[in-house]
Image (cartoon, rainbow, N blue to C red):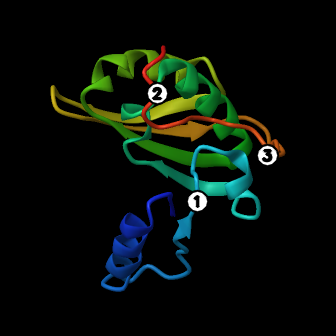
Amino acid sequence: MVEQDPLNASFMHGALGSTRLKDVEVVVADAGTTDVYTGAVPADLLLLGGVFANITLADASRTVTVLSHMCRPGAMVVWTSYPPRLDDADEVLALFATSSFESVDLHRDEHYLVAAHRYCGPARILPAGQRLFAFGSDEN
């Protein structure tokens, strides 16, 4: 789990104590850069809770492209979106559809979207030093 805000990271670490999850690390870092994932990828499961709800479409495009470098072949990517960027969800779905991902499941209403995609491409090396996204940017 990657969280830049130390207070949120502390909450996440405390919440993990009430679960059966083992070997889950909470990293206080900027999730929008590739360097933070070194040693943790390729992964079998990537969860992007709210990321696409808080970034621009240009950042979403870069992120989906690099997700293929973060996944093992057959890995699942589960992501969510909600307002104000919920209107951009169709474009994000199209980014996955034109990449090496197949849609597995989609749940959507006017308040949220949850999507799951399977990576169908080859194993790739994570590029170092790349910026994927920045929260709070308003440019599209």
Dot 3 falls on a residue whose secondary structure is loop
First-in-chain label (2 vs 1): 1
* Circle number at residue 13: none
6 w.r.t. 93: above or below:
below
Between marks 2 and 3, how big is the CA–CA gap? 24 Å
User: In the rendered structure, are the residues bearing label 2 and label 3 in contact, judged by CB atoms less than 8 Å apart?
Assistant: no
First-in-chain label (1 vs 3): 1
Dot 2 falls on a residue whose secondary structure is loop
Q: Nearer the viewer, mark 2 or mark 3?
A: 2
- Residue 74 picture location, percent across and down: 64, 46
* Circle number at residue 126: 3
- Residue 133 picture location, percent across and down: 57, 35
Residue type at mark 1: give it: Ala
Q: Residue furthest left?
A: 110
Dot 1 falls on a residue whose secondary structure is loop
Front residue of 35/82: it is 35
Number of other residues with Cα within 10 Å of mark 3, as a class: few under 14, some 14 to 19, many 20 or more: many
121 w.r.t. 85: above or below:
below
Please tell me which residue is depicted at 74% across the width and 38% down the height of the picture. Answer: 130
Please tell me which residue is depicted at 44% across the width and 40% down the height of the picture. Answer: 51
Which residue is identified by label 1? 29
